[in-house]
Amino acid sequence: MSVLDRKLLRDLLRMWAQALAIAFVMACGVATLVLAIGAYRSLEETRSAFYDRYRFATVFSGLT
């Protein structure tokens, strides 16, 4: 184990609360991303099922 490795370990042990807070914020960000992707996919699937059930068109065109 080199001197720099020992210093890194010592610094991490000294600021364990800050490292824990950073890890917690990163975990919350990942959880938010997973939640958003899941909600988006669920809404897409629900819309598709609704359109199939009530025979809506999947492509719309505007007339002017």
Image (tube, rainbow, N blue to C red):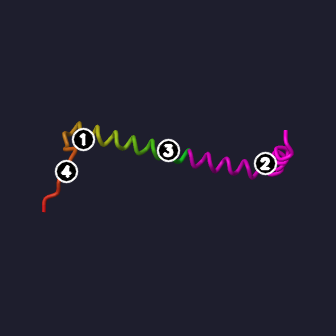
Task: Residue 16: say if magenta.
Answer: yes
Type of residue at label 2? Trp
Would residue 34 appear left or right of 58 to someone viewing this image? right
Q: Which residue is mark 2?
A: 16
Residues rendered magenta in the picture: 1-30
Neighbor class of circle 2 (other Cα within 10 Å; few <14, some 14-19, many 20+) is: few
Instruction: Identify the residue at image location x=66%, y=47%.
Output: 24
Q: Earlier in the sequence, mark 2 or mark 4?
A: 2
Q: Secondary structure at mark 2?
A: helix
Are discs 2 and 4 less than 8 Å apart at CB? no
Residue found at the far front of this picture: 2
Identify the residue under disc 4. Answer: 60
- Badge 4 marks a residue whose secondary structure is loop
Residue 4 in magenta stretch: yes
Of mark 2 and mark 3, the one earlier in the sequence is 2
Q: CA distance from mark 3 to mark 1?
A: 24 Å
| Left or right position of 14 against 61 | right
Name the residue carrying label 1: 51
